[in-house]
Image (cartoon, rainbow, N blue to C red):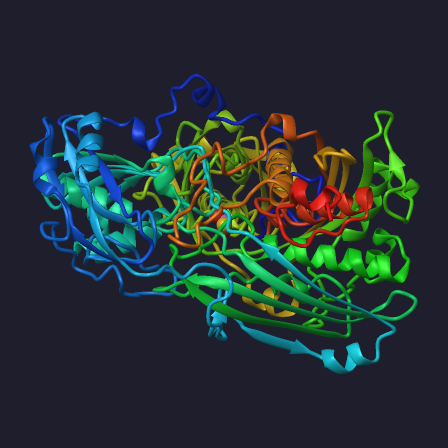
Amino acid sequence: MTLELDLTRDPAHIRHGSNIGQPLARRDGVLKVTGRARYAADNHPQGMLFAVLAVASIARGRVAALDIEAAKAHPGVVEVMTQANRPPLADDPDGKPNPFAFRFEALQNDRVRYANQPIAVVIAETLEAATEGAALLSPRYEAEPARIGLDNEAYIPPVVGMGFPAESRHGDVDTALAGSDKTVTTIYETPPHYHNAMEPHAIVAEWQGDRLVIDTPTQGLAMMQARLAGLLGIPPENILIRSPYLGGGFGGKGMMAGPQVLGILAAKLAGRPVKLVVRREQLYGPFGHRSPTRQTLRLGASREGQLSAIHHHARVVTSSFEDFYESAAHLTHTLYAAPAIATTYDAVRADTGTPLFVRAPGIAPGSIALESAIDEMAEACGIDPLAFRVQNYAEVEPATGKPFSSKALRECYTQGAERFGWWDRPLKPRMMRDKDGFLVGWGMGTATFHALMFAGNARAVIRRDGSGAVESGAHDMGQGAWTAFAQIAADSLALELDQVEFKAGTSDLPDAGIAGGSAHTATVGTAIHNAGAAVIGKLAELATADRRSPLYGAGNAGVVARGGRLLRRDDESRSESYGEILARAGLAEIDASGIGAPDQAANEHYAMHSHGAVFAEVKVDPDLGQVRVSRMIGAFAAGRIINPRMVKSQLIGGMIWGISFALHEEAITDHRTGRIMNANLGEYHVPVNADVPAIEAFTVEEIDPHVNPLGIKGVGEIGITGSAGAVANAVWHATGVRVRRFPIRISDLVPKAN
Ligand code: MOS
């Protein structure tokens, strides 16, 4: 029997239904805008107490004393949890059960390893009492000098990013550079970034005997459940995590963090449910951040502008107690066709929280450096930056020689440039002004992000009433995943969207892996697609083996599922509804599971990446140095698009972060104390509406027959890449000033007084 399961043949073709590819509005949109979507901190179980963290105001040393009596004496305070009385854990928070279990603080000792590290938890009847109690603790410290910044003693990290080698060479860059007509050597610096999701981390924890029920936003339900089970010494099935809505994740909610464990322990200690919401300034520490980088780019090219070598070296920072190394040079393996490519790293330790995954980890800081350096080389060769990129287009992945599973980057360049009007651009900087006298500049950058898949599971059900259900413990951080998954679910069962019940967001559903790496739609989408195919397959077996069915004996011809019916492929007049098949078989429903996982053979043969081209226009006040982005256009190729409306929103969101990267965002650390000085949304600048111009994002058609059955490549992170460099390059084109330390500031652009 053959089922019509191959969605890769024709991008416009819909196998079972017409949901995939439609720009449906968010299914949870009305709930969100009317305030009815219940986020973690909106929960209030009977008898709940409030917990507030006390956090360290030093970056290194030990807590010498806390005035616990003063806190406890405050009306309403129920308990103060410190290292002296916190309930025991079955596993060491400083242990490393797997490479993705990151060390954290849960009051295991009196050490302070970074500013804003939790040092106590005050539990009270009201939020106000807990807050006041925490203030009354008045900690005294034995402080040691904080080590901050990029200039500590450097070493070669064992691996970087998700296990990539810290040194990787293809060809001989030094020889190639020595023989190049043109060379460019430049150093770029990028600052620490924090996730700054609108919804802060929060947990509501309730113990029911040896069962634990928690509400907390997470991008990785099953991973968190497994880690908690190990820490608490209870079976994973005794832990229910509910995470139906996240007010943004960006990687910051991917890994379980100390404050969540402290909320759970506080509930245990108090013997009552506890809510712990992390205050905005306390988010700048225990939840990861984007490592600062210092990147050295050495490029060589022929007189005609053919790249001969790229050496991308990145210095990155990790914490004093954990190893996470931002893979900032990684994208250089894949983007431009140079015969010699080397990526190398070194690292320093600092007294900060551990840097972790932040939207487009590695690639975002790497991209602003590489795209700036490519722009500098194009300038050195006297070639238009887009023409230079096209001239150095990688037809195969440069570092591995693998063909791309698909790569419509050329179409992105062409269509993006056309919509932007790029070809009128003067080669030299400082040549354009608008009617108000502002300097105008145009810049562009190439966007790229790997097309990953993790492992995920889904279960699909068809019921006798003809309806369907699909479930997976998947996550929607606000990106619209549930809407896209519901679309895939409906098509996978050949039903209409409103005939299919879609369930996600809790840990008692099939393990959906992690919503990260831009891989969630591809992973869970494939699992749903396969679960649907499996249940349709079971239904077809029932029918074709039953003499009473009009589909009897259709085995060799095969059946097609459409509109809640199975039809004989060679004679569609012979068909039967799902309900009829189940009724005759005496079944109330039929179900099957599906998994989504990377195809190892395909990954061995093909390099898999999304691509894009971003074009930016900036206007710079020639006297005041103020920069405004006035126009931005991004063209992206990311395989099959499940929901164009959600995708556009994801891409625009990424492009705004690109503006932010180039012009706004920076966590500033006081080098004397190791404290972050702008740990709030007033002084940690992110773009507001006035900073964001008309942004256009669109996708070009790209059919990928290799990445996964649906041809999905992912769009969650690529929008930042390329965009930050495009803005920086536009600033150069407007002003003639090349700024290599980000964000670009007014003081970089105003004429220096001598
Ligand atoms: Mo992303 S930084 O993989 O959530």
Q: How many marks?
A: 0
The image quadrant of residue 322 is bottom left
Could you say which quadrant of the image residue 450 lies in? bottom right
Q: Is residue 302 above or below residue 70?
A: below
Farthest residue toward the front?
754
Residue 171 against residue 715 in the figure, above or below: below
User: How far across and how far down the image is residue 46, in percent?
Assistant: 15, 25
**Towards the viewer: 251 or 455:** 251
337 sits left or right of 476 in the view: right
* Residue 356 point in image, percent of width and height: 44, 55
Q: Nearer the viewer, residue 707 or 134?
A: 134
Give the answer, above or below, for where 523 lies relative to 242.
Answer: below
The residue at 65%/49% (across/down) is: 721
Q: Is residue 165 visible?
A: yes
* Residue 530 seen in the figure: no
Q: Observer-nearest residue: 118 or 173?
A: 118
Near-viewer residue (623 or 512): 623
**With 546 as the anchor, is 330 left or right in this view?**
right
In percent of width and height, residue 246 lies at 41, 35
Q: Is residue 642 above or below residue 674?
A: above
Q: Residue 283: image x %, image y %?
A: 37, 42
Q: Residue drawn at (38%, 54%), measured in percent from left and top?
A: 353
Q: Residue at x 66, y 64 (%)?
A: 607
Image-quadrant location for residue 426? top right
Q: Residue furthest top?
A: 34
